[in-house]
Image (tube, helix red, strand yellow):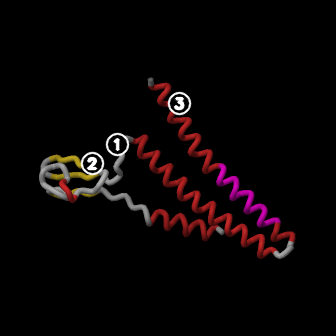
């Protein structure tokens, strides 16, 4: 079980690289706008002939954290779905064995607790953002 979660977590880290590009002349043009070869939804900053391209397409820390939360919720949703399938196999493989059924029930309980925490994390983040906005204005 832990091995499966470790593999899924490792794959998620490997598949989401965050790379900043810095090239003289930039990508897609020399006029400072990125031209037609630029990366869609990104911003460029030019200083002394070097263009820095923001591959994240976010303008603030709040937006960046919201994007991270969205990614974590998506990844967590996939993990919950996989775990529900695994728990189903655990119930089938139990074949009436009370000890194995107990393990499967415990795994199902913790899978559902994880799903509730995942949903709760997004709700809590939205509540915090609204509170900060209310305090700031």
Decide which of tag 3 and tag 2 comes sooner along the chain.
2
Mark 1 and mark 2 residues within 8 Å of each other at the beta carbon: yes
- Horizontal side, residue 58 vs residue 110: left or right: left
**Alpha carbon of mark 3 to alpha carbon of mark 1: how far?**
21 Å
Which label is found at residue 91?
none
Q: Where in the figure is residue 78, as x and y percent of width and height?
A: 57, 62
**Alpha carbon of mark 3 to alpha carbon of mark 2: how far?**
29 Å
- Horizontal side, residue 42 vs residue 81: left or right: left
Q: Where in the figure is residue 86, as x and y percent of width and height?
A: 68, 69
- The residue singled out by tag 1 in the image is 59
Decide which of tag 3 and tag 1 comes sooner along the chain.
1
- The residue singled out by tag 3 in the image is 131
Q: Where in the figure is residue 96, as x and y percent of width and height?
A: 86, 73
Residue at point 18% right, 56% down? 26
Q: Nearer the viewer, residue 41 or 86?
A: 41
- Horizontal side, residue 60 vs residue 103: left or right: left
Q: Residues within 10 Å of mark 3 (few under 14, many from 20)?
A: few
| Residue range (magenta) | 102-116
- The chief SS type of the magenta part is helix
Check disc 3 and report its element: helix, strand or loop: helix
Which label is found at residue 43?
2
Mark 3 and mark 2 residues within 8 Å of each other at the beta carbon: no
Q: Quadrant of residue 100?
A: bottom right
């Amino acid at each position: 079980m832990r091995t499966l979660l470790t593999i899924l977590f490792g794959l998620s880290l490997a598949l989401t690289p965050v790379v900043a590009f810095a090239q003289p002349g930039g990508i897609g043009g020399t006029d400072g706008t990125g031209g037609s070869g630029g990366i869609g939804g990104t911003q460029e900053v030019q200083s002394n002939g070097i263009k820095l391209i923001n591959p994240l397409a976010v303008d603030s820390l709040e937006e960046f954290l919201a994007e991270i939360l969205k990614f974590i919720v998506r990844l967590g949703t996939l993990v919950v779905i996989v775990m529900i399938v695994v728990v189903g196999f655990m119930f089938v493989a139990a074949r009436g064995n009370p000890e194995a059924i107990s393990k499967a029930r415990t795994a199902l309980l913790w899978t559902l607790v994880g799903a509730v925490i995942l949903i709760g994390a997004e709700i809590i983040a939205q509540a915090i953002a609204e509170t900060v906005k209310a305090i700031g204005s």
